[in-house]
Amino acid sequence: MLNKNAIIQAVHPAIQVEVFEKISSTNTYAQQHVDQTHMTAVVATEQTAGYGRQGRSFYSPKTGLYLTFVVPFDVVATKTPGIITTLIALATQRVLAQAFQVMTEIKWVNDLYRHDKKVAGILVEQTDQAYVIGMGLNVQAFDVPVALQDKITHVFDETIDRNVLVGLLLNAWFETITQTTQLDVSAYKAVSYLLNKTVTLNYNRTLLTGRVIDFGQQGELILNVNGDNLTIRSGEVTKVVAIEGKVLK
């Protein structure tokens, strides 16, 4: 169970914390009810109206962890909004690997994968004064709807202290967001789910198919399409093919 006092004691003193067992959406609450001039975390174990990119519904059972971090513009180190999602994904991957020995991979630009299935989704939004950084993490095993059984899974096979997890994530996010100006490309490539795979990408309403060959310091995806290297700063990967030709998504 989430414990507000335990989380407050674990995180940087500059971060304010609000905790809920159930909420409609941590991002929605953060945008409507949180002071945008202070760093504030909104944490919940269940969402009833979670959403992801393009407003799509985000399945949010009570076995998950839903975390939103409000960060005023004036404390953000990078001046490139597009890199924030990438930096948060890498920071999250490192926490899971280093603190819990759970290996995940980053599917550009905003998902974490384990065993070829999604375990986390990141959504970065903006208000007039702050970034609103949200993540849904499938913490423990749960009854997966039939339609999602080949798409999502969970991170931990055993029970963990969620308060410790929240503290580690928030501190990692705080350090990343306030101190990092560019992506550690070599570290990102080492945990990339897409590197050297053939993907189909929805880019500006156009479908591009090519091989992912690299990433840029601002989080760009470098896609080789018919011999030409394209730098993609935003988009959505709709299909992934493994090196041996197996369709993964």
Image: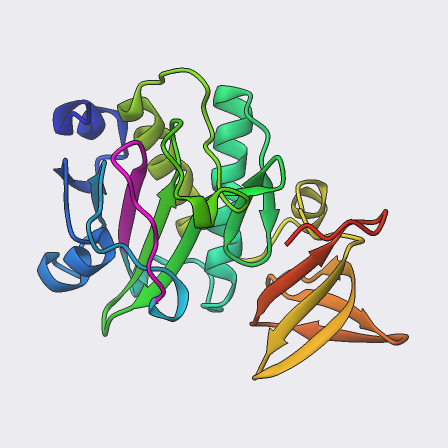
Position of 195 with respect to 56 (left or right) is: right
Q: Residue at x 48, y 22 (%)?
A: 99
Q: Which residues are magenta?
A: 56-70
User: In screen coordinates, is 32 left or right of 58?
Assistant: left
Residue at far right of view = 227
In the visual, does 3 lie left or right of 232?
left
Along the line of sight, which residue is nearer the eye, 242 or 33?
242
* Image: 144 above or below 140: below
Residue in the image at 67% along x and 42% along y = 187
Residue 208: x, y in percent? 71, 76
Q: Is residue 221 above or below residue 243?
A: below
Q: Which residue is depicted at the point 27% across and 54% down?
A: 50
Total numbered circles: 0
The front one of 87 and 96 is 96
- Look at the image and say whether residue 224 sits in the magenta stretch: no
Q: Is residue 242 shown to the viewer in this render?
A: yes
The picture places residue 104, in percent across and down from the top left corner, at: 58, 35
Name the residue nearer the viewer: 162 or 11.
162
